[in-house]
Amino acid sequence: MNDFHIFLQLLLSGVISGSIYGLIALGFVVIYKATEVVNFAQGEIMMMGAYFCYFLITSFHISFLPAFIITLLFASILGILVEVVILRPLVGEPIFSVIMVTVGLATLLRSVVGLIWGHENLAFPSPFPDTTIEIFGVIATPVEITAIIASVGLFIMFFFFFKYSKLGLATRATAFDQRWSFLMGISVRKIFSLAWILASVVASIGGIFLASMGGLDPSMSLIGLKVFPAVVLGGIESIVGAVLGGLIIGIAENLAGGYLSTYFGSGVKELSAFMVLIIVLMIRPYGLFGKKEIIRV
C-alpha cells in the first residue's frame, strides 16, 4: 500500500469514526437546543442502548432487526424517564446543579451496566458479515459503510425535521424563548421530553454501530467526553455543526494516530481532538456554526 492509499485509508477511517461521533453529538445539540442543558450522560445512554440490544439478542434470541426496533423504544422510554423523573424537578435551579446531575446520572448508568454485564469486553452479535470491501485500494467493512449511510440519512432527517415540521419549529421556538413559546400555546414540557427521546434514540443507534465494530465494554461510554469537543467545535446549537464537528474530530484523530504516533506516542490520537478544539476556538470562540452573542451595556 503506497502513501496515497494509506492517506485514503486513514481518511475513510476518520469519516467512519466521525459519522458515529456526529450521531452522538447530535444528541447533545438536540437537548441543548430545547432545554439549554448540556447532557454529560449522553455517552452512557449510548452505552445502555448497545447493551440492551445485546441483551435482547443473546438472552431472548431475537433477531437483530426486531431487537434494534425494541431498543429504540427502550431508548425513548429511558429518555422520557430521565427528563420527567430527574431533570423536570430541577427546572429553575442553577444550571451548574443540572449539569452535575447529568454527571451523576452518567456514573449511575455505568455502574448499572458493570453490575449486570460485568466489565469485560463482550462480542456484539452483529448481523453484518466479516468480509471486507475494497474500493480504489481502500478497505472497509459492511458495518462501516452502513454506519456512514445511516448517519447521513439521520442527519438529513433531522435537518428537515427542525426546518419544516411543526414539532421541529416548536422545538426551535422553545430553544429561542421558553416563556414566549409557552404563551403561544407550545407545550414546553412535551418539547423537553421530545428532545430527550430524540437524543436517546440517536445515541443508541450510534452505540449499536460502535458495538458492531469493536464489541461492548463499559468504557465505551467515555466516547461521550471525546464527542464533546466536536459539539463545542461545531457550535453547541447547530445540527450542521454537530455533523461537521464530528467529522473533523474523527479525521483529525485518525490522521494524528497514523502520522504522528510514531513521533509522539499513541496518546497523540486522543489529544488531537482537544488540540483541534483549542485552535478553532482561538479563532471562533463560539464554534464554527455557533451563534455569536452580543451583549449591549
Image (cartoon, helix red, strand yellow):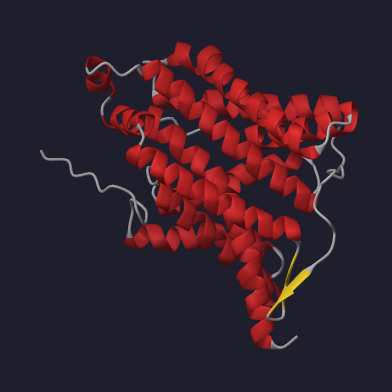
Counting from the top left corner in percent of width and height, residue 55 is at 82, 30
Q: Is residue 9 above or below residue 213?
A: below
Counting from the top left corner in percent of width and height, residue 172 is at 32, 34
Q: For residue 103, what is the image quadrant?
A: top right
Of 82 and 69, the residue lying toward us: 69
Counting from the top left corner in percent of width and height, residue 32 is at 42, 34
Q: Quadrant of the N terminus?
A: bottom right
> In this orientation, does residue 99 appear?
no
Give the tally of numbered discs.
Answer: 0
Determine the residue positioned at 57% across, 24% down.
79
Of 215 and 164, the residue lying toward us: 164
Of 11 and 220, the residue lying toward us: 11
Determine the residue positioned at 67% across, 28% down.
107
Q: For residue 57, what is the image quadrant?
A: top right
Left/right of residue 109 with respect to residue 292 in the rendered view: right
Left/right of residue 2 with respect to residue 158 in the rendered view: right
Q: Is residue 56 above or below residue 20?
A: above
Determine the residue positioned at 33% across, 62% down.
283
View extreme (left): residue: 297
Determine the residue positioned at 58% across, 55% down.
19
> In this orientation, does residue 85 appear?
yes
Q: Quadrant of the C terminus?
A: top left
